[in-house]
Image: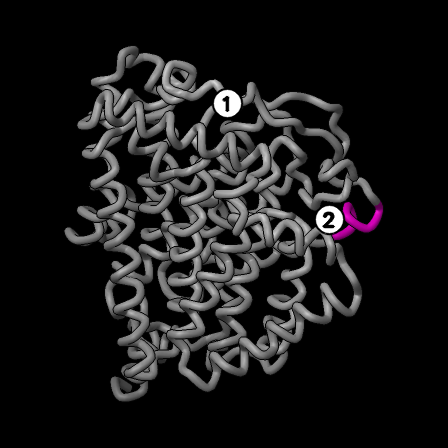
Amino acid sequence: MAAVLTPPAPSTAAGPRAVSRPPWGGWRSRWPLLPLVATVLLPALPHGASGGGGPADVASGVAVLVCVGRLLYLRRRPLSATAALVLGLPVVGFALATVTAADPAAALPGLVRYLQVFVLVPIAVCLLLRDAHGFRIVAGSLVVLAVVQGVTGVHQYVTGTGASYMGEDIRAVGTFGPSDIMGMATVVAYGLLAAAACALRTPRNAPAWLRPCAAVLAVALIVPLTLSFSRGVWIATAAAVLVVLALTGRRQALTSLAVLGAAGVVVVGGFGIGSEMIADRAASVTRVTSTPDRSVSDRYAMWSAAGAMWRERPAAGVGLKGFPAHRDGHASIGLSSGSDTAGAGQEFRRQALLSPHNMYLLVLSEQGLIGLTALLGSWAAILAGAVRRLCVARSRGHAAVDCGLAAVALMTWQSVNFLYADIGGPTTVLNGVVLGLAAWWALSGPDRVSAA
C-alpha cells in the first residue's frame, strides 16, 4: 500500500516536471496576477486626468497590497538580499531630495509617485511572479494592450480623427489623446518587443500557432508605431530590437532584419502610409543642430535649464516636483510657454512644459548626483543581470529564454527612451511593471527563472 501512495509525491514538488503543465491552467493559484494584468490593461481606459490617479494606479496599489498580504499571511520568502539592495537603492535619492527640498510638503506627492513606479510596483511584480508562465501572462497583457491601442491609432490615421500633426488630424495617439501623445507609442513599443521575443524564442510546450502569430503581431505593430510620429520611441525600439537580435545569434538576427526591412518597405513604400511625412520626421532627427523645429528647440532649452538647476544644487538637486517651479529662473528666453495640442476629440489648447523630457536630466536636476547615481546604479544592475542571465540560459538550453529576451528588450527600450522622455501620464505605472519584469528575470532565483 505504501508503494502505491508514494509515486504521486514528486508531482507536487517544485521543478521542471511540475511546471510543464499548460500555462493557462491553474488560475486558482495564479489569481494574484490579476491586479498586475489589470495594471497593464487599464491605461487603455480614457480618463480625464493626465497625471497619476487613474484606474491603472489603483490596480497597481491593489497589486502591492496583495503582495504585502501574501507575505504576511502565507509567510512567503521575501526578496533576496541582492534584489532588496538593487530595487531599494533609489529610495536613498528620493528621500534625500524630499527632505532637502525648499518645500518638503510640496515634494511629498513626488516621493509617493517615485516610490510607486520605481520601487513598490517592481517589487510587487518580482514577488507575485512565481515562474516563467506568470511572466508570459503579464507580457501577453502588454501585447493585448498594444494591439488595442494600435488598431485605434491606425483607425485615427485613416479616418483623420487623430491628434493634430502638421495641420492634419492624423497622428495616432490611441485612447490617450493629444495631451499624452507618447502614450500609444509607448504601449505599442512594449507589445511589439514582447511579441518579437516570443517569436524569436517560442516556449517549448507552446501551441504551433503561437510563433507565427507572435511574428505577425510584431510586424503589424510597426504600422501604428510609425504613425505615432514619435522619434524618441522609434530610436528606442530600434535599439532594443538590435540588442535582442544580437543576443539570439547571427543567422536569426540576419533573417529577422531582412523580414523587418521588407515589412518597412511594404508598409511605407508599397502602401504609401504616410511616407512623405514619415521620411521628413525621420530626417528631422539629424537636423537637430542645424534647423531644429520648435519642439526640439524647447527640449534643448529645458535640458539647459535642468543642467543649470543641477549646477546650483549639485548634491541633492532642487527637490522632487521642483523642476516646474525653478524652470523659468533657469531657462533661456527662447523657451516657449507651452506646446500646442489639438485633435482626437480635444479642442486646441496650450500644454505647459513642466519637465525636461529627459528622465536622466529630470532626476539630476531634482535629486542631484546622489539621486541619479542611486537610480542609474539600480537600473544598470538590472540590465546587466538580465543580459548575463540570458546568456547563461541560452548556453544551457533553458526553456525560458523568451522571458529573458523580453526582459532585456523592455529594459533596453526603457533606458534609451528615457533620453527623450520622462514619467508622466496614465502609462507611467507601466514603467514600474516593465522594470519589475526585467528585475524578476535578472534577480530571481534560478529555479524560478528557468521554469518553462
Nearer the observer: mark 2 or 1; the answer is: 1
Q: CA distance from mark 2 to mark 1?
A: 36 Å
Say whether residue 270 is left or right of residue 205: right
Which residue sits furthest right? 159
Picture layout, residue 179 above or below residue 421: above
The residue lying toward the viewer, choosing from 203 and 434, is: 434
Q: Amino acid at mark 1?
A: Gly
The local crowd at label 2, few if under 14, some if 14 to 19, many if 20 or more residues have their Cα within 10 Å, is some
Quarter of the image with the N terminus is: bottom left
Mark 2 lies on a secondary structure that is helix
Upstream in the sequence, badge 2 or badge 1?
A: 2
Q: How is the image coloured?
A: one colour
Quarter where residue 55 is shown: top right
Q: Position of residue 127 (x, y in %)?
A: 32, 51
For the residue pair 267 and 20, the one nearer the viewer reads as 267
Which quarter of the figure is the C terminus placed in? bottom left
Q: Main secondary structure of the magenta part?
A: helix
Q: Is residue 134 visible?
A: no
Residues at circles 2 and 1 in contact by the CB criterion of under 8 Å = no
Relative side of 252 to 168, left or right: left
Q: Residue at x 47, y 18 (%)?
A: 333
Left or right: 298 with respect to 127?
A: right
| Secondary structure beneath label 1 | loop
Location of residue 183 with respect to 256 vertically, above or below: above
The percent coordinates of residue 355 (x first, y second) are 45, 28
Residue 203 visible in this rendered orientation of the protein:
yes
Give the labeled residue for mark 1: 334
x and y percent of residue 147 in the render?
65, 56
Which residue does the image show at 22% across and 22% down from the upper left? Answer: 313
Q: Which residue is mark 2?
A: 152
- Which quadrant would residue 349 be assigned to in this image? top right
In magenta, the rendered stretch is: 154-159
